[in-house]
Image: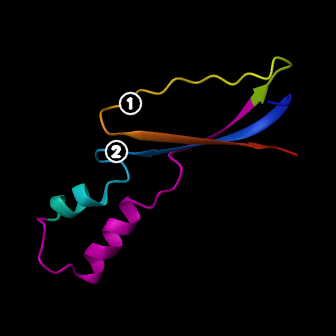
Amino acid sequence: MPKGKYTVETYRIGYRVNDPYATYMDLGSPAQLTKAQVAEIKSKNSGAPLETKTVKIGRDGKFEQQFDLRENEVVFITLKPLR
């Protein structure tokens, strides 16, 4: 990667993290959702980044970060250069 500062956004999908089915089950798995329940499911599972931070990439062009993953979990990161 080119040297410089970057914004790192971390997204996660898995059990109880951006997991609308788990939220639905927590609501008692109703046969018909109310508008309030739909809003709750959407707000708890928006897909927004769980973490946003700034990092500095040195001359070596390396970025390293470790993530703890559970079974059936996905982590997606984006690095956007700051100008």
Q: How many marks?
A: 2
- Chain part drawn in magenta: 28-55
Q: Are marks 2 and 1 in contact (CB under 8 Å)?
A: yes
Left or right relative to 4: residue 43: left
36, 2: nearer the viewer = 2
Residue 33 x/y as whole percent? 21, 78
Confirm whether the magenta stretch covers residue 53: yes
12 is higher (above) or lower (below) than 62:
below
What residue is pinned by disc 2? 14
Residue at position x 36%, y 39% from top? 73
Q: Quadrant of residue 52?
A: top right
Q: Amino acid at mark 1?
A: Leu
Q: Which mark is residue 53?
A: none
Q: Dot 1 lies on which element?
A: loop
Q: Which mark is residue 69?
A: 1
Q: Quadrant of the N terminus?
A: top right
User: Distance of mark 2 from mark 1, alpha carbons?
Assistant: 9 Å
**Mark closer to the chain start, 2 or 1:** 2
Residue 49 x/y as whole percent? 54, 50
Residue at position x 38%, y 68% from top? 42
Residue at position x 32%, y 68% from top? 40
Residue 65 x/y as whole percent? 58, 24
